[in-house]
Amino acid sequence: MTPAALLHFIEALLWCALLFVSIAGYGALLLRLFKVRRPSISLAATSGFGVVIFLGGCLNLLQAITASVLVGLTVLGVLAAIFLRVTFIETDSQIEAAPQPTSSSTVATGILLIATVIFAVRLSATVHSGGYQAGDDYNFYLGTPQKMLQLHHYAADPFSERRIMSSIGGNYFLQDLVLAVLPLTALQMADRALGLILLAFLAYALSIEFRLTRTQQAIFAFLVFFTPQLQFNLTFVLLPSALFFALVYLAAHRKLSTENAALQALLLGAVTGVIATTKSTYLPHGVIFVLCVAIIHARRRGLPAGIKTLLLGAIACFIVMAPWMVASHFTSGTWFYPLLGKGYQYSAYGLYPAPSGAGISVILHKVIPFCSPLVLLVALEWFLGDRDEQGEAILALSVAGLVATLLVGISTGGDSVRRYNYPCIIPAMLLLYIVFSRRRNAAPSARQWPILQAVTILFIGYTAITTWHQKFTFEFDQIPAGLKGAFHETPIVPASVVDQYAAVQRSIPTNAGAIASVTNSFLFDYRANDIKIADFPGAASPPPGWPSRGDGEVLAKYFLANNIRYLVCSYADAVIFDEVAVQILNDPSRTQWIHSEQAISLRSHQQYAELARSRRHIYDDGQIYVLDLESPATTLSNSPNPPQTTPINP
């Protein structure tokens, strides 16, 4: 570790801390409009994410996302936090708290110290990612926020499946807030660092709101920090998970419930909107939670109160998402995939089955078993939990997790059920400890509550350990690898690869249109060329759709009609992809979504191979070629001999 590396490490942590304070400042501004003074940082930050995502959407429409604007936005938020006197203490809840059973301060201090160490280690490991997912991060998720910052908006990528399906852009804006000052290696801090910081404050705020003893507060904090999320790629998981905690915090907030129910409903909707802009599969969880809260309010306060909660929540959610939805409509052909249209996604053209086209047996095999523990969780909270408004807020999250997991699992054909739902499921599971802690505090002499507390801790511990050792994501290995990368400033790819992509881009005439199916799309400078990313070539395309049933000549005409003259392809890596794809297509246990993606890509690679034999190569280094689609190959010797792909009939 060099002094420079240590300085950059500290700089990264300080910048993310400033970003968090800035977000809380914008939340304090919003709360001041509703006459809430000196809010806690938990409430202010929870509120602030909605404001920041909305402002980001407006900047995106104005094409004004630049480093200087983002730094200025951050500074204004920090000043707002200072002048509006955001506090670190949940003052109001502490004043209202009822007498609690005493606990051993020594035990509580020891547990809290362990939790603090875990938090510090995990936070430090966010400065540099421990690894990137080859099929997702290198060819899209690393490049997208860079492209947004270079072009000042979430530019159109009509040939990118992830551009349409993953999110409408809120997550990339948060990443650009990080990249305004820090290098690309710190990109994941937008999710993991901000998420962990928010988790820390919410763990404390929830403990106060639910009136836990000091030992219970320490145990809950330990469970929150010890239980990881599945970090398969750079898509957001930790921040959404913290925001699902925030939904329960808002719904259970006594002061909001009694003094400003309208603000409570608006914040619930705004947080749901923020979650949905980070990944589209999270929207059902937030919507169902708000619906459950509206039902609770209708039952406790009357039907008009429930309708008011639902309507205000829907309005706030729409306001936060609206700028991003408008941009998505113009760039991807859908306001919000898939609920409001398929846009340019492949299934819109009917050539390949949609993700939800899996048979009932696959869905039953992959979705129902995963939901079984959630059914148990809901049953425990329904029959054993407190049925006051605070207890029902926890129950609402568990119900939302169960119902949304079923819906998302069916819509994706059973694909990645764990990844798409864990950010909601983990908070629901952890809050079970609070459920039994409250019952124990209300009836200290009852023997069943300590037993259920212990069982809950063991269950959470088992889940955490199995997640740490999950072979699909290698969570446990991410921390030492991340720390090593941060202190040694390990580059994402070797310098030779950077030079290779620079040479590739130099071969493309300035301002010429190109489409790229490459391994490392984040290495391009999108200011020099209009480069469209085709992460899964053929899986997304503007009307009338990718001509999968045609040959290479038909594809070339389609590209040229869309002002694309040059085709860039990592054809050496495509060989490995195609070999694996054939195996996947012959595996009946894989979902329809995966089968369709592999078939589409295989067919597209076959078309690429035809073009590689008929078009002039303006660049070819044995791994990547650049084809001029308007110029035929002069001689056979000018064309490489790219590997043949297995013909796939759509």
Image (tube, grey):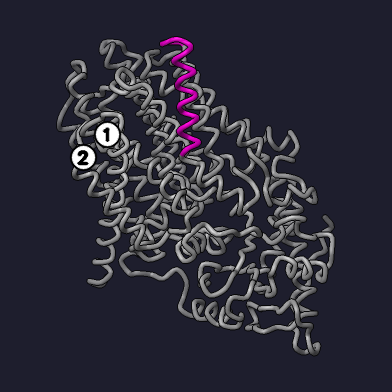
Residue 66 place in picture, x, y as percent:
40, 62
Dominant SS type (magenta):
helix
Magenta stretch encompasses residue 312? yes
Along the polypeptide, which appears first: circle 2 or circle 1? Answer: 1
Q: Quadrant of the N terminus?
A: bottom left
Secondary structure state at the residue bearing disc 1: helix
Q: Which residue is mark 1?
A: 32
Residue 529 place in picture, x, y as percent:
57, 73
Residue 627 place in picture, x, y as percent:
70, 78
Residue 389 place in picture, x, y as percent:
38, 16
- Residue drawn at the location 29% of the way across and 46% of the way down: 119
**Is residue 524 in view?**
yes
Label 2 packing within 10 angstroms: few (<14), some (14-19), many (20+): some
Tell me: 545 left or right of 421. right
Tell me: 337 left or right of 42. right
Residue type at mark 1: give it.
Answer: Arg
Callout 2 touching callout 1 (CB < 8 Å): yes
Q: Which residues are magenta?
A: 299-319
Q: Residue 84's mark?
A: 2
Q: Quadrant of the C terminus?
A: bottom right
Number of numbered discs visible in the structure rendering: 2
